[in-house]
């Protein structure tokens, strides 16, 4: 079941419960994650879009309420912890250290973490930690 399908399945119970905030949230995101053709956005793209809203909220630039952001967090898989990122980057530590520039090192790290739910800031910190080690 896709994210949009799960949202649709929760819409009717939210409406019956007269939960206005959840109903509005589900309607908004169903519309956002449905393409103009009527097809649903792939789950990976949907999560990416929702993560970007949460990232904007961290920087303080958002029009969403705290309640809406909390509902959104329920739909976005948790990111890896900085400690777990370091563990996953251990096999790629030598190429990360050998990279000429920080950007290249970050690129090596992101390739090693492909498909994982990570925050860029956490990966940058892990790369900096790896590069500072002898």
Image (cartoon, rainbow, N blue to C red):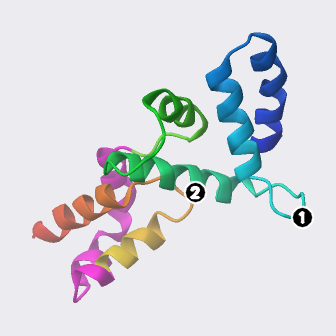
Q: Residue furthest bottom?
A: 100
Image-quadrant location for residue 102: bottom left
Q: Residue furthest right?
A: 38
Spatial CA span between label 2 and label 1: 20 Å
Q: Residues within 10 Å of mark 2 (few under 14, many from 20)?
A: some
Q: Identify which residue is drawn at 69% across, 42% down.
A: 28
- Location of mark 2 (residue): 48
Q: Identify which residue is drawn at 55% across, 36% down.
A: 72
The location of residue 128, given as percent across then percent down, is: 18, 66
In this picture, residue 47 sits left or right of residue 54: right
Look at the numbered disc 2 and give the secondary structure of its residue. Answer: helix
In which quadrant is the N terminus drawn? top right
Q: Identify which residue is drawn at 46% across, 45% down.
A: 63
Residue 59 higher or lower than 69, as above or below: below
Q: Nearer the viewer, residue 105 or 58?
A: 58
Q: Is residue 90 magenta?
A: yes
In which quadrant is the C terminus drawn? bottom left
Q: Identify which residue is drawn at 80% across, 61% down.
A: 35
Going from N to C along the chain, the mark reached first, 2 or 1, is 1
In this picture, residue 15 sits left or right of residue 103: right
Q: Main secondary structure of the magenta part?
A: helix
Q: Nearer the viewer, residue 84 or 80?
A: 80
* Magenta extent: 81-104
Mark linked to residue 37: 1
Q: Nearer the viewer, residue 22 or 97?
A: 22
The location of residue 11, given as percent across then percent down, is: 79, 27
Q: Residues within 10 Å of mark 1 (few under 14, many from 20)?
A: few
């Amino acid at each position: 079941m896709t994210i949009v399908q799960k949202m649709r399945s929760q819409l009717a119970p939210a409406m019956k419960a007269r939960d206005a905030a959840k109903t509005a949230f589900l309607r908004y995101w169903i519309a956002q994650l449905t393409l103009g053709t009527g097809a649903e956005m792939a789950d990976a793209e949907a999560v990416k879009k929702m993560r970007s809203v949460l990232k904007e909220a961290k920087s303080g630039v958002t029009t969403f309420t705290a309640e809406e952001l909390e509902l959104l967090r329920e739909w976005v898989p948790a990111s890896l912890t900085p400690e777990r990122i370091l563990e996953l980057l251990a096999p790629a530590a030598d190429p990360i250290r050998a990279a000429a520039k920080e950007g290249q090192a970050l690129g090596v790290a992101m390739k090693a973490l492909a498909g994982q739910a990570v925050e860029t800031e956490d990966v940058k910190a892990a790369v900096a930690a790896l590069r500072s080690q002898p």
